[in-house]
Image: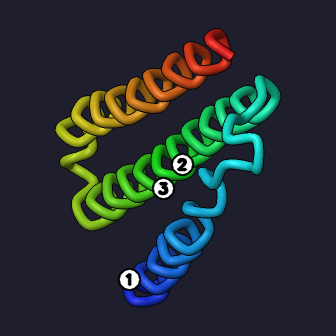
């Protein structure tokens, strides 16, 4: 996917969220939301959090692995020098996804 298409897709999602966000926080006639609404939005936030983290992590890991393999294909003698930094980068990317999972579980725990 090209950068322009990815930017357009992200802009569409942001526009949709900004369009529908005020209606999500609108109060009903009684003036207070019930407990189910709070649980519903908390679970939705947790799901979106882990979905975005998993998507970003998978995208980052794919690009890192592709770049490392491309470098090895261009210079096979450098495979030893590329392997350790690639594994370190993949581990750091995965740690960010696990951090998002912990945050999502904390959100679900409070709901």
Query: Which residue is pictured at 34% across the width and 64% down the height?
Result: 70
Please tell me which of labels 3 and 2 falls first in the chain: 2
For the residues marked 3 and 1, what is the alpha-carbon distance in whole angstroms? 13 Å
Which mark, by number, is residue 59? 3
Query: Which residue is pictured at 22% across the width and 34% down the height?
Result: 85
Considering the numbered disc 3 on the image, is that residue within a helix, a strand or a loop? helix
As drawn, the residue found furthest toward the front would be 30
For the residues marked 2 and 1, what is the alpha-carbon distance in whole angstroms? 17 Å
For the residues marked 3 and 2, what is the alpha-carbon distance in whole angstroms? 10 Å
Image position of 76 (left or right of 100): left
Image position of 97 (left or right of 91): right
Which mark, by number, is residue 72? none
Query: Mark 3 or mark 2: which is in front?
Result: 2
Query: Which residue is pictured at 69% across the width and 17% down the height?
Result: 111
Residue with the mark numbered 1 = 3
Considering the numbered disc 2 on the image, is that residue within a helix, a strand or a loop? helix
Please tell me which of labels 3 and 1 falls first in the chain: 1
Which mark, by number, is residue 52? 2
Image position of 7 (left or right of 44): left
């Amino acid at each position: 996917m090209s950068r322009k298409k990815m930017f357009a897709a992200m802009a569409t999602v942001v526009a949709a969220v900004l369009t529908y966000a005020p209606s999500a926080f609108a109060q009903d006639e009684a003036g207070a939301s019930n407990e189910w609404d709070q649980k519903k939005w908390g679970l939705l936030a947790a799901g979106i959090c882990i979905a975005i983290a998993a998507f970003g992590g998978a995208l980052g890991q794919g690009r890192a692995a592709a770049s490392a393999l491309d470098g090895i294909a261009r210079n096979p003698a450098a495979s030893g020098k590329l392997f350790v930094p690639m594994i370190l980068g993949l581990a750091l990317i995965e740690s960010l996804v696990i951090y998002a999972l912990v945050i999502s579980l904390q959100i679900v725990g409070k709901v």
